[in-house]
Image (cartoon, grey):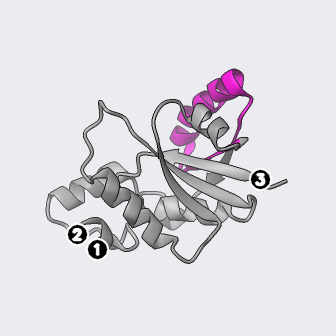
Amino acid sequence: MKKTAVFPGSFDPFTKGHECIIDKALNLFDEVVIGIGQNTSKNYLFSLENRKQHIESIFEHEDRVKVLVFTGLTVDFCKSIKSDFIVRGLRDSKDFGYERSIAQMNYEISGIESVFFMTVPEYTAINSTIVREIHKSGGNIDLFVTNAEKLVK
């Protein structure tokens, strides 16, 4: 039976840290679905279409990665595509504390397990909020985002 995991997030933008987590997850799962969650109350810097196309460009040669958009609860999305696992990335203990609580709640309401992967040390400082600020201030985000030119077109 195929093991599919969902890596959910807003990915505004999808960073090299996110990419690292996908690479690690592919060692454990047959397929990883990158689920771009839509939150109508959130203001995004990059459009949904740009974020989706950007992520697809990064994994265009990896047929075990799919990029889908969803609304609602992550666990409902997981059920809709028959995934029993949620993948999350951790940079530090602060991330772990936050993610652990969400994982426990997700498991309680759905039975879906969360699997955590540590990012590599060189990507620990990268987070989407800082990358957005660099971009908004006219800075170059190529160090933090693969194929950044496809995102900021």
Q: Position of residue 5 (x, y in %)?
A: 67, 50
- Of all residues, the one furthest to the bottom in this rendering is 61
In the image, residue 9 lies in the stretch drawn in magenta: no
Magenta residues: mostly which secondary structure? helix
Residue 80 in sight? yes
* Res. 120 visible in picture: no
- Classify mark 2: helix, strand or loop: loop
Badge 1 marks a residue whose secondary structure is: helix
In the picture, measured across the screen, residue 152 lies left or right of residue 68, that is left
Q: Residues within 10 Å of mark 3 (few under 14, many from 20)?
A: few
- Mark 3, secondary structure of its residue: loop
Q: Which residue is mark 1?
A: 149
- Three-letter amino acid code at disc 3? Lys
Residue type (three-letter) at the residue carrying disc 2: Lys
Q: Of callouts 1 and 3, which one flags the residue occurring earlier in the amino acid sequence? A: 3
Identify which residue, 42 or 119, lies in the foreground. Answer: 42
Kindly identify the residue that appears in the image at 44 percent across and 63 percent down.
Answer: 55
Query: What residue is disc 2 on?
Result: 153
At label 1, the amino acid type is: Glu
Crowdedness of circle 1 by 10 Å Cα count: few (<14), some, many (20+)?
A: few
Q: Which residues are magenta?
A: 85-114
Q: Are marks 1 and 2 in contact (CB under 8 Å)?
A: yes
**Residue count near mark 2 (Cα–Cα under 10 Å), binned few <14, some 14–19, many ≥20:** few
Instruction: Report the front residue among 122 and 54.
Output: 54
Which circle, 1 or 2, is nearer the viewer? Answer: 2
| Above/below status of 133 relative to 148 | above
Residue that numbered label 3 is attached to: 3
In the image, is residue 108 part of the stretch drawn in magenta? Answer: yes
Q: Earlier in the sequence, mark 3 or mark 2?
A: 3
**Which residue in the rendered view is the most extreme toward the front?**
80
**CA distance for labels 1 and 3:** 33 Å
Which picture quadrant has residue 46?
A: bottom left
